[in-house]
Amino acid sequence: MTKPNPARPNLTTLLAVLALAGAAVYFVPIARSQTPSDNAPANASNAPAESAGSSSNATKAWQTLNGAIRQLVDTGPAFEAKLRQVTRVDGQEVRAVGRYIQSSGLRGLMRMELQSPIGDQTSRFEQTCDGRLTWTREQVGDQVRIRRVDVGRLDELAFTSGISARFKVGGLPELLDSIAWDYDLHLVRGVLKETQNVWIVRGTLKASRMQTLLDENGQAVAPPELPTKVRVALAADGPFRLIPVRMEFSSEPSSGDSGPARLISELDIYEIKAIDPPKEELFRYSTTEDDAHFTNETQIYLDRFQTRMATIPATPSLRR
């Protein structure tokens, strides 16, 4: 039996989910309730350095993101990595650490974990998929929110080619897929931390997507935390080619301010290492008494992918 979530998330929370693959759905609202801290500037030394004069176009950027998704779920090696996340909202900063495990070969196995100390509590985020069900569990203190998606039902969608929608629910694949659909993209070549060659996909939130989010949340004006800019650094070579290694989401500068965009959130995927094909048991969700009430979001994903299918460009290179 499912228990629907009566509260509609606000726009900031919704977009934080996009920015951090679901991990910030609790971290961002909680950060607002804590004692304010100084808004630390972005660390420029960690940001991807972009090459000048790039002529890459939106089609190439789209294809690169979809190539990264395929590398994650199909053709690349199974791997595990560490995660480091920083979220900045209203001059406050929340840090989280965790791990990520991804199986390949179209097995549909993924696990993502993050936790962050906030005040005298610890926020925990867990997302796992065993190829049949994707479970997301978020906990702050005694408050628990649980969501489930029956990814097997997404096979009902008749994608003409490419990776099935069932492999784009949860973790890094869902994040990259959302960026591909919600942002106008541009591709450049760059270097991360002066040592690692990367492809950088830069994106600007589509006006149509922004309006949809505002309408769905009953807001007339975009809040200052709206991440209208994104940069994704993908490994350009080596055994983990096209695996994302850093993501940044930024907002427009304050009204009347001509300065650079404000960095809202950043996610580092580091110490990536190949592993033997993991056993399915590692990705099975361990239920508790709290899990008797969960939100079944399968229909939400069915509707989302059906809408996307209806708007797939006719250009063969863009069909998925």
Image (cartoon, grey):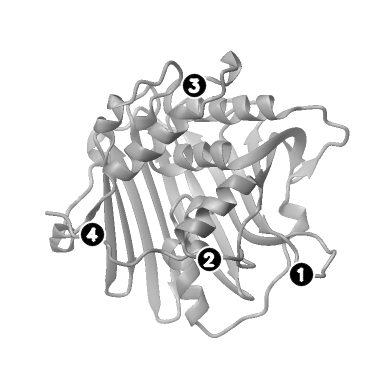
User: In this rendering, is residue 4 above or below 107?
Assistant: below
Measured in 3D between alpha carbons, the distance from the residue under mark 4 to the one under mark 1, in whole angstroms, is: 38 Å
Return the residue at label 1.
255
Measured in 3D between alpha carbons, the distance from the residue under mark 4 to the one under mark 3, in whole angstroms, is: 32 Å
The answer to which of 112 and 300 lies nearer the viewer is 300
Measured in 3D between alpha carbons, the distance from the residue under mark 3 to the one under mark 1, in whole angstroms, is: 39 Å
Q: Residue 42, image x and y in percent?
A: 72, 62
Q: At label 4, which amino acid type do we have?
A: Pro
Q: Which residue is drawn at the image coordinates 58% and 52% (left, top)?
A: 210
Q: Residue 182, image x and y in percent?
A: 57, 42
User: In this rendering, is residue 176 above or below 40?
Assistant: above
Q: Residue 183, image x and y in percent?
A: 62, 42
Q: Can residue 299 be seen in this view?
A: yes
Q: Residue 298, image x and y in percent?
A: 28, 42
Residue 196 is marked as none
| Marks 2 and 1 close (CB-CB < 8 Å) | no
Q: At label 2, which amino acid type do we have?
A: Gln
Residue 320 is marked as 3
Q: At label 1, which amino acid type do we have?
A: Ser
